[in-house]
């Protein structure tokens, strides 16, 4: 009777361990899938983002226009 009970407990323990392993593996695969989708989305979003435009300075002194910008503390006008 003791050996039959220990046999059933051993089989139950092995079955529980296998179920836990399958559950953990499926969670890992789900996390890997979510991470890859997020990374692909970030890559596509970075490619579609507009590129910054470089500001150029007009070197012609006679046609110089005043520069106006806001530095966060107030508007600056450079004549």
Image (spheres, rainbow, N blue to C red):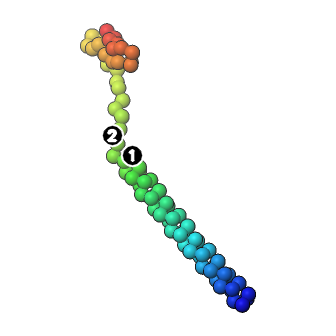
> How far from the left and from the top, in percent, is residue 8?
65, 85
Foreground of the two, 68 or 58? 68
> How far from the left and from the top, in percent, is residue 40?
41, 55
Foreground of the two, 72 or 10? 10
The quarter of the picture where the C terminus appears is top left
> How far from the left and from the top, in percent, is residue 73?
39, 15
User: Residue visible at 73% across and 88% down?
Assistant: 3
User: Residue visible at 37% across and 51% down?
Assistant: 44
Which quadrant would residue 25 be assigned to in this image? bottom right
Residue 50, numbered label: 2
Residue 46, numbered label: 1
The quarter of the picture where the N terminus appears is bottom right
Q: Find the distance from the CA under tag 2 to the CA under tag 1.
A: 9 Å
Foreground of the two, 47 or 8? 8
* Label 2: which secondary element: loop
Is 60 positioned to the left or the right of 18 in the image?
left
């Amino acid at each position: 009777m003791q050996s039959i009970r220990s046999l059933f407990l051993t089989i139950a323990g092995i079955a529980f361990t296998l179920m836990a392993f399958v559950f953990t593996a499926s969670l890992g695969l789900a996390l890997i899938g979510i991470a890859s989708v997020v990374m692909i989305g970030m890559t596509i979003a970075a490619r579609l983002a507009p590129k910054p435009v470089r500001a150029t300075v007009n070197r012609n002194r006679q046609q110089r226009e005043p520069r106006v910008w806001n530095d966060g503390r107030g508007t600056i006008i450079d004549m």
